[in-house]
Image (cartoon, rainbow, N blue to C red):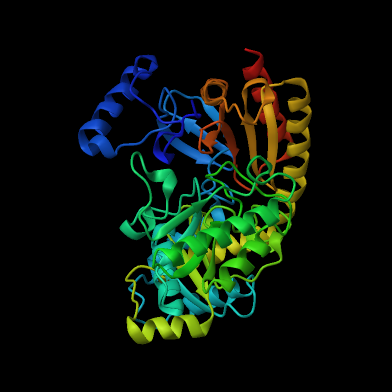
Amino acid sequence: MPPETHDVLTLNAFDGRGGGRLDSATRALLARRTRNFGAASVLFYRAPLNLVRAEGVWVHTADGRRYLDAYNNVPSVGHSHPRVAKAIAEQSGRVSVSTRYLQEVIERYAERLKATLPKSLSNIVLVCSGSEANDLALRLARQATSGVGFIVSEAAYHGNTAAVAEISPAALKRGGVPKHVRTVPAPCRQAYGNDIAGGFAAAVASAAAALKKSGVPLAGLICDTIFSSDGIHAEPCGLLAPAVKAARAAGGVFIADEVQPGFARTGEHMWGFGRHGLTPDIVTMGKPMGNGFPMAGVATRPGILTKFCAATGYFNTFGGSPVAAAAGLAVLDVIADEDLQGNALRVGDALRERLAELAQRDGRIAAVRGAGLFLGVEFCRAGDLNQPDPKTASCVINGMRDGGVLIGAAGRHANVLKIRPPLCLTSAHADLLVTALAATLAA
C-alpha cells in the first residue's frame, strides 16, 4: 500500500479531539470560532493556542505560557517589531489612500526592493497577498508565451485563488490537477538518485512534452525555490538551472515563487533563486514582505508587463498603498541594520549541524535538509525514506507544543518538521529548539 498523502490544510491541524485539554475560556473562544467560520476554520495542534501577544521569537497565550516560535515566517524580522509597527502607525496617521496617487514612499520602496533583485526585473506590481501575486504571475506567463500549461512539483502550494489552487496539488483533498497542469516529483535523491538536477530537468522536459502532446502549449514552470510544501529540498545548489533551461526550451517562462524562501531566509542570498544562479522571468513574493502587514508583489521584465497591460491592464486598490510601502521599507531596513541575512546563515548552519547530530543518535530521523533558517527534519520508519512516518512527526509537533516550542509539518506525507522561525532567532533559541526536540523524541 502506498504511503498516505495529506493536503496542506490538514498538516498539523486541530481536528476537534483535543478540545477537552483546553481551559474554559479557550473552549468558549473555540466554540465561537466554529460558529463564525464553520468548515473554513483551520487551527494548529491537537489543543489550539489562544494567543494574546508576541515579541521577537516568542508568543504568549491567555493561560500565561510563553512559546518559542520556530514556525511562523510571516513576522519574518520578529513578532511585533517596534520599527515596523511605528512605520505602519506613522504612515497610517499621515495618509493612506488607493494607489492612483503619487506617493514618494511608494517609489522609495519600489526602488529599494528592486535593488535586491536582478537588474532585468525592473518592473514591480504590488498586491495584497501571495495568492494574488501568483495569480497575476500566471496571467503574465500566459500573455508572454501564448501558452496555457504549467508544470509544478507534486506537493506544491502556491495559494488559494481559483487559478492558483489549480496549480497547488497540496491543497487538493480529492481529485487531481486539471489537464493544463502537470506535476513532477520534487528534486530529491529518492526520486532522481544521485543526479538530482539532471533528473529534475528531465522530468520537466517530459512534462512539457506531455502537455504539448495533449494540445496544451507550455506557459511556464513555477517553483517555490526551496520546495517547502514538498518537504524542503535545497540541495545541491544550482539544481534548478537545468530544469529552467528545459522549460524555456519548451517555450515557457520560469516563475520563482519566493513567498516562503524570500527576504533573506535562506541565508546566503536574499532570494531562494540566488542559490541556483538563476534570473527568473517572474518573481512572486508575499508573507514576510510586511512582517504581518498584508502585502505582496510581482517583479518582472518590462517587456512581459507591457505586453500584459496592453491586452488586459492591472489595478489593485490596496496593493502598494503608502502604509504597505512604509511597512515594506521598515522590513528591508531591519534586515539590513540587524544583519538578519547573516544571522540566518550563521544560526541556521549551527542549527542544522545540531539537528544532524541528533539524527545520528535517533534512527527515526532519516534526513535533515534546508538552507539558512528554513530547515526540514524528515521522519521515516527505520530511517528508510521509502517508509515515511507521519505519526512520529505529528507526535513530535504536538509534544514540542506542550514543551513550549511551536513547529509545523510539510511534505506529501506530513512526515517532515518545517522549521521556519523569525530571522532574529539566536543560537540560544536554537539550542532550546534542539533540546525540546530531543526531549520530545525521548518521550
Query: Between 294 and 81, which is closer to the camera in this rendering?
Result: 294
Which image quadrant for residue 7?
top left
The C terminus: image quadrant: top right
Q: Is residue 301 left or right of residue 181?
A: right
Which residue is depicted at the point 30% across and 37% down?
A: 41
Residue situated furthest left in the rendering: 35
Residue 106: percent from the left, percent from the top? 47, 75
Q: Is residue 171 left or right of residue 223?
A: left
Query: Between 325 and 235, which is closer to the camera in this rendering?
Result: 235
Which residue is depicted at the point 51% across and 33% down?
A: 413
Residue 270: percent from the left, percent from the top? 66, 61
Residue 263: percent from the left, percent from the top? 60, 59
Observer able to see residue 323: no
Query: Between 161 and 239, which is closer to the camera in this rendering?
Result: 239
Which image quadrant for residue 46?
top left
Query: Between 136 and 238, which is closer to the camera in this rendering?
Result: 238
Q: Is residue 305 left or right of residue 389?
A: left
Residue 223: percent from the left, percent from the top? 54, 58
In the image, is residue 61 above or below residue 362? below
Residue situated furthest top in the rendering: 443
Observer able to see residue 53: yes
Question: Number of callouts in the render?
Answer: 0
